[in-house]
Amino acid sequence: MIEFNNVSLVYPNGHQGLKDINLKINDGEFVVVVGLSGAGKSTLIRSINRMVTPTSGELLIDGEDILKYKERQLRKLRTEAGMIFQNYNLVRRMSVLRNVLTGRLGYTNTFKSLLGLFSQEDIKLALNNLERVGIKEKSYTRADELSGGQQQRVSIARVLTQQPKVILADEPVASLDPPTSHKVMSDLRKISKEDNLTTLVNLHFIDMAKEYADRIIGLRDGEVVFDGPASEVTEQTFEEIYGRPIREDDMLGGDEE
Ligand code: ADP
């Protein structure tokens, strides 16, 4: 379980990114965080693997305050809380398989990883995860030869190969067209449910959030202004989160492939 107790974050320039956040996220929950650009969505999910560090409060994962973590514990935390990014963060010139294997680096010693030596077991795991996201046949293709949707699926396979407890996805579909976005979101949800992985996803589009989330957290100016099941999101909730009535461009639309 992830628990935010009175968590605030003030950036060095004095900007308050998070204001007194109190949340409990249960194991296996698929949570979508929504809000305007600048609302604090990234700051919230990046706090969970300490890519940013809140300046007050407690952030507990399975009862341990990760805000107290130092180097070795932080490395373990970042293995347990895997990230997916908008721009995929793949090594463009490396094969798909090798990119996915980098998910094992948290477990391999530096010498072996420098030589690119991975065990048969790691390779089997990586290939299996590529199969789960439907692109095993691309294993030996260079990452930059794939489409955006395929690259994001490689990054999902990489995060799975890391064998995390938590997946943090920061605008994972913001660079993809609507049908591909739906495909990536449904893969992510399916995998998260199959493996009982707690997943937090930042999304820009409210209709997508409603379609895939168990629970929606709405942020505005660093504060939680909505927290509830996707089924309870109404037009009024939308106005609370976005500070204005809903518009067509708040919807992604499009159908699943
Ligand atoms: P979102 O993901 O919802 O777009 P962010 O979490 O990226 O929002 O940012 C929240 C607020 O914090 C924004 O106003 C942003 O400009 C500010 N911010 C983000 N990173 C920094 C930083 N390193 N220094 C100062 N302000 C920052």
Image (spheres, rainbow, N blue to C red):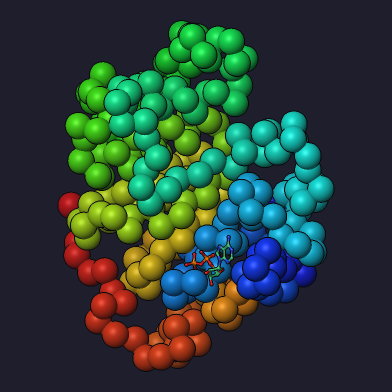
Quadrant in which residue 9 is drawn: bottom right
Q: Quadrant of ligand 1?
A: bottom right
Instruction: Residue at 59% x, 26% y: name it.
Output: 106
Task: Count every numbered label the image shows and give the total.
Answer: 0
Asked if residue 245 is positioned above or below residue 213 in the image, the reply reads below
Residue 246: percent from the left, percent from the top? 34, 86
Image side of residue 201 versus residue 150, left or right: right
Front residue of 94/172: it is 94
Q: Is residue 220 visible?
A: yes
Image side of residue 249 versus residue 65, left or right: left
Instruction: Residue at 25% x, 81% y: name it.
Output: 248
Q: Is residue 228 visible?
A: no
Asked if residue 2 is positioned above or below residue 139 in the image, the reply reads below
Asked if residue 213 is positioned above or below residue 146 in the image, the reply reads below
Residue 167: percent from the left, percent from the top? 53, 46
Residue 46: percent from the left, percent from the top? 58, 54
Instruction: Residue at 55% x, 23% y: name it.
Output: 105
Quadrant in which residue 112 is drawn: top right
Quadrant in which residue 94 is drawn: top left
Asked if residue 34 is positioned above or below residue 96 in the image, the reply reads below
Instruction: Residue at 59% x, 10% y: name it.
Output: 111
